[in-house]
Image (cartoon, rainbow, N blue to C red):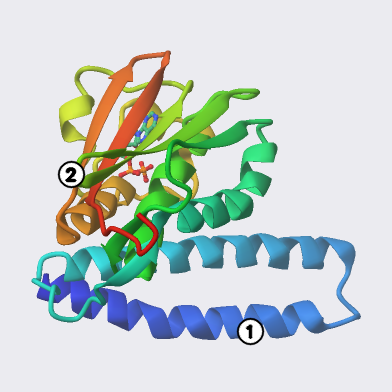
Amino acid sequence: TEFMANATHELRTPLAIMKGNVDLALMKKTNSKSVRENLEKVNVEINILSDILKDLTLITSSGQNINHIIDKTPVNITELINNLVKRLRTIALEKNIKIKVKSKKIKDLFSAGDEKYLEKLFINLIKNAITYGKNNGNIVIELNVVKEVLKIKITDDGIGISKEDLPKIFERFYRGDKAHTNEFNSNHSGLGLAIAKWVAELHGGKIDVKSIFDKGSTFTVTLPRLKGKLD
Ligand code: ADP
């Protein structure tokens, strides 16, 4: 853990310098079209590396008990998910995937927690549903209350997960057999679900998964419910 913490820290500075220089180079009006295109490609990869470093920093801290540093304030989970879906729709559109949010009974559902961490949890799950979803597919996100808990189900009709992969997908750095193909290779480090699970548990919740290979997957997040003033 200490090695990871140091390594990720050390990698951040050269990456920031690279990014600064590429940004400067991109501003030059004298660049030819091909130079600009190459620089933009470098920029994309720098952003990917930077996302992976952020995930590594998070997963390193997951070895420690950070209960004392995370906020536990009321978070409107319904609003958080609707806002995320708005942001992620552009990526989904690239594969013509439709995302539907269904919220039964109560308009706004709350949990107590740290909004940034909870956002990361749901970003990882929804992004996966898009990444491993099929072109022209559908993602359905259902929010429900069962007794004192919130259940948030994210269902896709994508590539599904094999029986061999299923028990291992929440392990750090584990990537499914199919995920190694070129189609899914960029920007994936095998950390997304490990982080999502850790965040759920940090908030007193959990994540369950059901999946049928080649048919699709459902990830269910359970979080303790914080009753709102209007309930
Ligand atoms: P990554 O996506 O970076 O590989 P994750 O930890 O997010 O890492 O997921 C681990 C593995 O679980 C993926 O490599 C993939 O095989 C599988 N997986 C996760 N979400 C889905 C999904 N919605 N549909 C199919 N497979 C999935």
The residue that appears at 16% across and 61% down in the rendered structure is 202
Q: Is residue 175 visible?
A: no
Question: What amino acid is at disc 1?
Answer: Asn
Q: Which residue is label 2 attached to? A: 171
The nearer-to-camera label among 1 and 2 is 2
The residue that appears at 36% across and 77% down in the rendered structure is 11
Whether the residue under disc 2 has CB within 8 Å of ligand 1: no
Q: Position of residue 105 (x, y in %)?
A: 43, 38
**Distance in Å between CA atoms under marks 1 and 2:** 36 Å
Quadrant where the C terminus is found in the figure: bottom left
Q: Position of residue 174 (x, y in %)?
A: 24, 41
Tell me: residue 112, above or below residue 181. Answer: below
Q: Secondary structure at mark 2?
A: loop
How busy is the neighbourhood of tag 1: few (under 14 within 10 Å), some, or many (20 plus)?
Answer: few
Tell me: residue 194, above or below residue 161. Answer: below
Q: Is residue 112 left or right of residue 86?
A: left
- Ligand 1 is found in the corner quadrant, namely top left
Question: What amino acid is at disc 2?
Answer: Glu
The residue that appears at 56% across and 48% down in the rendered structure is 85
Q: Which residue is label 1 attached to? A: 21
